[in-house]
Amino acid sequence: MDDRELVADALAGQRRALARLLTLVEDGSEERLREVVRRLHPHAGGAQLVGVTGPPGVGKSTLTNAMVARWRGRSRRVAVLAVDPSSPFSGGALLGDRVRMQDHALDDGVFVRSMASRGQLGGLSWAAPQALLVLDAAGFDVVVLETVGVGQAEVEIASVADTTVVTLAPGMGDSVQAAKAGILEVADVFCVNKADRGGAERTIRELREMQRLGHGEWLAPIRRTVASTGEGVAELVDAVDGHHRWLSGDGRLVRRRADRARLQLRELALGAVRGRLMGVDGGGLFDDLATRVAEGELDPYTAADRLVARL
Amino acid sequence: MDDRELVADALAGQRRALARLLTLVEDGSEERLREVVRRLHPHAGGAQLVGVTGPPGVGKSTLTNAMVARWRGRSRRVAVLAVDPSSPFSGGALLGDRVRMQDHALDDGVFVRSMASRGQLGGLSWAAPQALLVLDAAGFDVVVLETVGVGQAEVEIASVADTTVVTLAPGMGDSVQAAKAGILEVADVFCVNKADRGGAERTIRELREMQRLGHGEWLAPIRRTVASTGEGVAELVDAVDGHHRWLSGDGRLVRRRADRARLQLRELALGAVRGRLMGVDGGGLFDDLATRVAEGELDPYTAADRLVARL
């Protein structure tokens, strides 16, 4: 099957074609990918893009699963992209797609895919936009991007999603504390999951106190859930959809998507330049300069200047 | 004080000068930084660079503190750079330097600095090499780079350190599981901290089993510590120093440092190109292309090609 057919099948929502295109994104076979992206791009833009992030152990997979069920109850078709940034080398995601989301295995309106983000290729900020594009163009109403949110990943998710759900759990001590600094600025909706555990009130109170210190024009609502029983998940989905309605007003969604396009453009351009930098003189100049830096003969800035000058 | 004096003072080990240079790295004022790096670079290369990483909550700060005490007992001067990648927006690190490492507050042979890694500037892989260069050139025998190790950060630490210590704790369930996939390949030494807790044996056993599936020419030793009491820390420091001795043989350290120089060269060159890409036509071309991508008129790869063509 050639890529033209593959794209046509993906646009028609064929799951096998979707899976093959996502493998293309994951493998980063750029030559084929650029042709595929070129064909898919005009069909994208209709999906509601939702990021779900939070530290390890807060129950993000179970929560995503429960949210998918709610959206399905509202007749919306949902795709889930679970990105595992902790696995840069393995080339395969930790939790197989078969293990995840078993509740929806027979539902044609749900598509689930796990991906490893590859450090070499610029990671999440490189792969996620292309993967979302595939699922968006394929006509899903909601596309969920789920990832462990520690460090850079949070910021990157927020930059590709329309709505970012930051998930916490009570009593996680240090890790929640550590996570908080960055998350306040990326969260559109907060979810305190495992809310039947002790400490949920305290976590909510701490979030409210942080929000009192300052927020933008949108005050992120805080929802409490017990994803394993479904408690509070309908209210969480309401909050997510509510944020999307708010975004749609006053040109906010258009601006957010323009920011996303800027990010994607920058990453793709840098990716192209990276290849050219390493390839000057068949890689000889790069190696030579690096060796001279390592030996203390040349400082790294001067070396970088010489390399860039030869582009 | 001009930068020439600042560099001279830093080379003489003056703490105030070191602090000011690290602020320069953190703020990313590139013009001044490149001059400073150019002056410092010939003086660097003498320090043993140790990365300490692991998931949140395993006690990395306490462990680093305890290791510093051991190195001081061996008359080695130690600098600690604690990078907090979870705080990309704040511009300030979570734990103030005064709170950290109080045991060493009056010891002139110890220097501690917390830094936030800034998402905008390429994060850890951009800032860490310059910060390490400052501390290395200032004549510290050991420079420790401590950071939360989830996702990309682990790989980046491993790429700048001579020896990477991956720290785990018993009974962390999911988060250790999640961390394991990537860490096996970056760890030169494993530390199971909080080893007085139940489950330490199991964590060690699981690590051994993973190692049995394959490792490179170096088999990472596994050490157990209780950092809060100092138990096992001398043995951990022995393992770290042992790895450094092994590296020093057979040209391995030279090769590792050449790899580091390649990374630094690439990041600096890409940083320079990034500025130029966004600045074509005073930023007009970048904005125009991004808008056309957002509106579905132009696909992102074609847009990136047009941008790169104008470099």
Image (spheres, coloured by chain):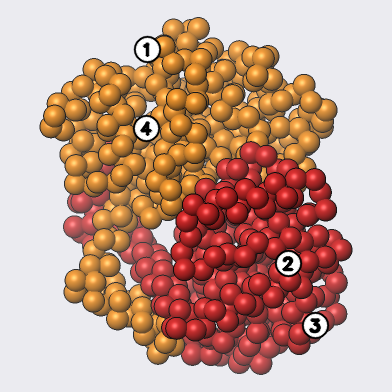
Chain colours: A red, B orange
Residue denoted by label 1: B108
Query: Which residue is pictured at 71% across the width and 32% down the height?
Result: B169
Question: Looking at numbered disc 1 in the image, what kind of residue is underneath it?
Answer: Asp
The answer, for residue A303, to whether it is visible in the render is no
Q: In the structure shown, which secondary structural element does the residue marked by tag 4 occupy?
A: helix
User: From the viewer's perspective, is the residue at label 2 or at label 3 nearer?
Assistant: 3
Instruction: Tell me: residue B48, above or below residue A149.
Output: above
Alpha-carbon span between mark 1 and mark 4: 19 Å
- Label 2 crowd bin: few (<14), some (14–19), many (20+), radius 10 Å: many
Q: Residue shown at 30%/55% (left/top)?
A: B271
- The nearer-to-camera label among 3 and 1 is 3
Which of B35/A89 is in front? B35
Judging from the image, mark 2 belongs to the subunit labelled: A
Q: Residues within 10 Å of mark 1 (few under 14, many from 20)?
A: few
Whether pointer 1 and pointer 4 mark residues with C-beta atoms closer than 8 Å, the reply is no
At a point 57% along the width and 87% down the height, the residue shown is A46
Of the residues shown, which amino acid type is indicated by label 3?
Gly
Determine the chain carrying the residue at label 4: B
**Element type where label 1 sits in the image:** loop
Secondary element under disc 2, as helix, strand or loop, is helix
Q: Tell me which numbered mark, 1 or 4, is placed earlier along the sequence.
A: 1
Please determine whether, in this image, residue B235 is positioned above or below residue B32: above
Q: Circle 3 sits in a helix, a strand or a loop, which is it?
A: helix
Question: CA–CA distance between discs 3 and 1?
Answer: 65 Å
The mark found on residue A73 in the picture is 3
Q: Which residue is mark 4?
A: B132
Q: Chain of mark 3?
A: A
